Amino acid sequence: MENPESWRTVYDPQTGQDVILSNEDVELIKNVMGSRIPDGSYNPYEPWVDWFTNEVMETPVTGRPEHKRSFIPSRVEAIKVGRMVHAIKMGWMKPREAKDTSVERHKYYLMWNADDKSEDVRRIENPIPAPKPRLPGHAESYNPPPEYAFSEREITQWNRLSETPYQRKFPFVPKRFSSLRAVPAYDRFARERFVRCLDLYLCPRAKKMRLTIQPEDLVPQLPKPRDLQPFPTVCSMIFKGHKGLVRTISHDPSGQFLISGSDDQTLKVWEVATGRCFKTFEVKGTVRCVSWCPNSAIALVAAAVDNNVYLINPGVGDRLVQAKTDEILKEMPAQTDYLIPQRVRAVLTWNEPDKEQWASGFRVILTHFKAVKHVAWHSKGDYFSSVMPEGDNRSVLIHQLSRRRSQLPFSKSKGLVQCTLFHPLRPYLFVATQRHVRVYNLLKQELTKKLITGAKWISSIAVHPGGDNVLVGTHDRRLCWFDLDLSTKPYQALRHHGQGIRAVAFHKRYPLFASGSDDCSAIVSHGMVYNDLLKNPTIVPLKKLRGHDKFDDFGVFDVLFHPTQPWLFTSGADGTIRLYT
């Protein structure tokens, strides 16, 4: 057994024994090592007891009366003074020279003020000059111009305002005199001087420091965009082929292929390097969301079409991976000891495709009881989530592919769910409702955080690859950046788009993020996140990319970064997909 008291046991060389230190001994050693007073109970800041004061007591210590000799001139001192006077007259004794007070014996310094001020400014506070009285105008002249002379109507109005003299145009009636000598003494002179003195005496005066700030100084110093390269600037390729709105796009883990879903009831697989359409999957319904499985060991795409989620083998890439995927999904796993809960059975069914569908590439069909809007994969590639906004407390479902099981994580409805995302590193689930983003811990099954966006309608969310920053796009044109370690309120809100934001995305390797909007533009920004927790993220807008045409008041539907290159894919309402490099 280890000795639990080993940390406080010391060896005594005089007795040769191990001594266990008491709590008082340990505290004394800590105080000595910390350069503090060894005795912890001693207070060096006890109140000072003032034994001798400068206050004169009402009753003296001794009441003895003054001696009689205190009132009689001293005879001995008179003889001494006479001798000193005689010695000075004879020159035997010279008096001390008077001290030159102009030369300071000691030089004093002001301890508490800065040395860059002059002495008079330090010692005397700058007096605030009184405001100067208003200079007299033409109306005060002894011979004013005729336009300043009052008419009878103006004199009557001036007399009527005797109770409210501050409403008068002038405090006097302008008069004309033939010469300056004919001007009488001003009858209100003493009164005006008295009021002026009252103003100076009673009105407080404060010095206002005028700030000379240039407008350029208020703008934060951001690095120049050319110093933050690489980032996409030019439209290099346009993928054409869809006949309807291209609502969603996704790429495979390697970035070689791209899949898109459209309102023309098709899914198309493209090769990124050439822009060639490899395959087209016909689906009976509008494709709301498509997501490629991030696990490179299997070739699988999840597509949300009306009430169904199709798991499709795209048939591109490595043949061995395609064969392995088909082998895994060919047979349903045994569900001997597992009983599907009643709540899940009422919401969803796992179906096998028929032979025709299998030949087309469909591998598993998940039929929901409401329309599915969003699908998102976990980073490991086994779990994925589906969102039905109209499903109330059954809007979010989490599915496990390997066991063909599903679960409803929430029993209560927290609002109209827009989309969900898995945390890239931790077992967290981000659920975006209309106004808030909730972060749930899937292991503890509890709410961890609730992000307050202040927006009326959230459209999309994206999680930084590090996992500590979240990007939220809203239909009311705001792009909110959340730092999860900092606060539940936005660290920064960007309003660069003219219309609602449809999609946001982070790059996996480069410090870049993008947002696509209905104003037919995608804005690429620099977003550097530092490992130092004391350093805030740097956010710099870089480039506004245009190219899509408007259709039915819709612009850019989805934005997506290439997994390895600083390239950006955008899908629009004009039926095209654009690659910016």
Image: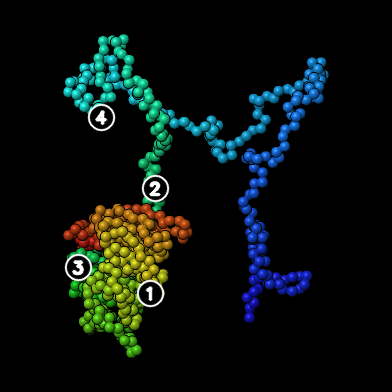
For marks 1 and 3 on the same chain, the one whose residue lies earlier in the sequence:
3
Kind of residue indicated by mark 3: Asp
Q: Earlier in the sequence, mark 1 or mark 4?
A: 4
Mark seen at residue 220: 2
Q: Residue at x 64, y 49 (%)?
A: 49
Q: Which residue is mark 3?
A: 263
Q: Where does label 1 land, which residue?
A: 445
Residue found at x 67% / y 66%:
25
Amino acid on which the number 2 mark rests in the picture: Pro
Task: Give the class, few, some or many, for how many residues have Cα within 10 Å of label 1's Cα (few <14, many ≥20).
Answer: few
Which quadrant of the figure contains the C terminus?
A: bottom left
The first of marks 4 and 3 along the sequence is 4
Q: Is residue 575 above or below residue 133?
A: below
For this rendering, which residue is in front, 428 or 168? Answer: 168
Residue identified by numbered label 4: 163
Which quadrant would residue 346 be assigned to in this image?
Answer: bottom left
Q: Residue at x 64, y 54 (%)?
A: 44
